Image (spheres, rainbow, N blue to C red):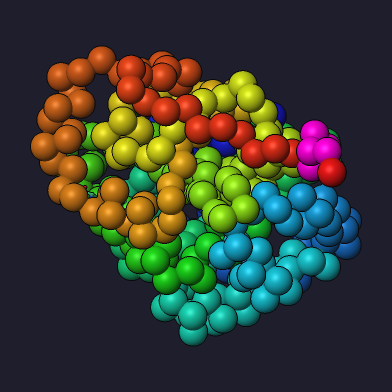
Amino acid sequence: ADFFKTLEEKSDGGKLRGNYSLADERYVVRQDWASYTREQHALWRRLYQRQAKLVPGRACDAFIDSLAGLDAADAIPQFERASDALYKATRWQLVAVPGLIPDQTFFEHLAARRFPVTVWLREPHEFDYIVEPDVFHDFFGHVPLLFNPVFADHLQEYGKGGLKALKLDALTYLARLYWYTVEFGLIQSPQGLRAYGAGILSSGGEIGYCLSSAKPRRILLDAERVMRTRYRIDSYQETYFVIRDFEHLFAATGPDFTPIYARLKAMASLPANSLLPGEENLPPNVSAEESVS
Ligand code: PHE
Ligand code: FE
């Protein structure tokens, strides 16, 4: 598995990887692109090549279309160049950060249409598996979708919603939504299910598993259901939530969550592998290997 601790773990005060000594009050640093070594660029290239082979037929079109334009195949990308292109497309920008940052700061960046991208790259022995997000996860997994106007607007709203959830002491719930959408979301397409979650798209194993395995549940997204549901950080997901399109995601997360948070606080959470009465478990894609012509 390849997984990351995200929002729920960020605040635990544990030691974070990355050099925070040069960060400003928003946790922003210079990328210092010249300091990456040849070996690091070569490792990026290997990571990129593996994923680039896997995305056709598995990632959503929005991801594939903008990935090509990012010109990130050969070396760790320069954030400023990508940021300029992104700004032209959706008025989002990239900022370099040392690693995980405090929840409040993270949400403030998103609310201002700035996406924080970690500067450090994993080590070769972490090719398949990292505990905290690195530049490959953040850039390859997250940046392409920011070129999609609906997804981009949704992520800004998520940032605002995060600041609100902090005040309402409801971050546990909102973090589950992020996990099951932005990190591990699936989307329907005329050709079958596709991945749009960054945790899937940057993973060599889960990108196939999430679409083709008969094991996990696949349930049409409902925000309140998602926010009731715990998640696994130490294995592939036991449940994936599916959106019809990005408008579905935008609409499902649009309503004021205040009353939902109040309800959720009075309810027990659901295990990661639950299927409720009346819920349809959507079938996996027929994988290329299994399909007979
Ligand atoms: N609508 C949510 C609220 O009222 C905020 C939100 C927007 C959450 C988009 C997720 C995504 O809190
Ligand atoms: Fe991520």
Residue 24: in sight, yes or no? no
Reply yes or no: does residue 69 show up in magenta: no
Q: Main secondary structure of the magenta part?
A: loop
The quarter of the rendered structure image containing the C terminus is top right
* Up/down of 150 relative to 268, above or below: below
Q: Nearer the viewer, residue 227 or 217?
A: 217
Tally the marks. Answer: 0
Going by the picture, which residue comes out furthest to the bottom? 88
Q: Residue at x 32, y 56 (%)?
A: 250
In the displayed structure, does residue 178 sit left or right of residue 138?
Answer: left
Q: Is residue 285 left or right of residue 28?
A: right
- Compared to residue 19, the image places residue 7 above or below, namely above
Q: Position of residue 179 (x, y in %)?
A: 45, 39
Dividing the image into 4 quarters, which one contains the N terminus? top right
- Residue 69 screen position, x and y as percent: 67, 76
Task: Describe residue 177's horizontal placement relative to residue 267 as left or right.
Answer: right
Position in image of residue 15 (x %, y %)? 54, 33
Q: What residue lies at 25% left-to-right and 15% top-to-bottom?
A: 268
Q: Furthest-front residue in view?
A: 293
Residue 285 shows up from this direction: yes
For residue 290: magenta?
yes
Between 195 and 157, the one nearer to me in the picture: 195
Q: Residue at x 47, y 62 (%)?
A: 115
Q: Give how far across and how far down residue 160 sits, in percent.
A: 26, 56
Identify the residue at image location x=33%, y=17%. Answer: 277
The magenta span reads 288-292
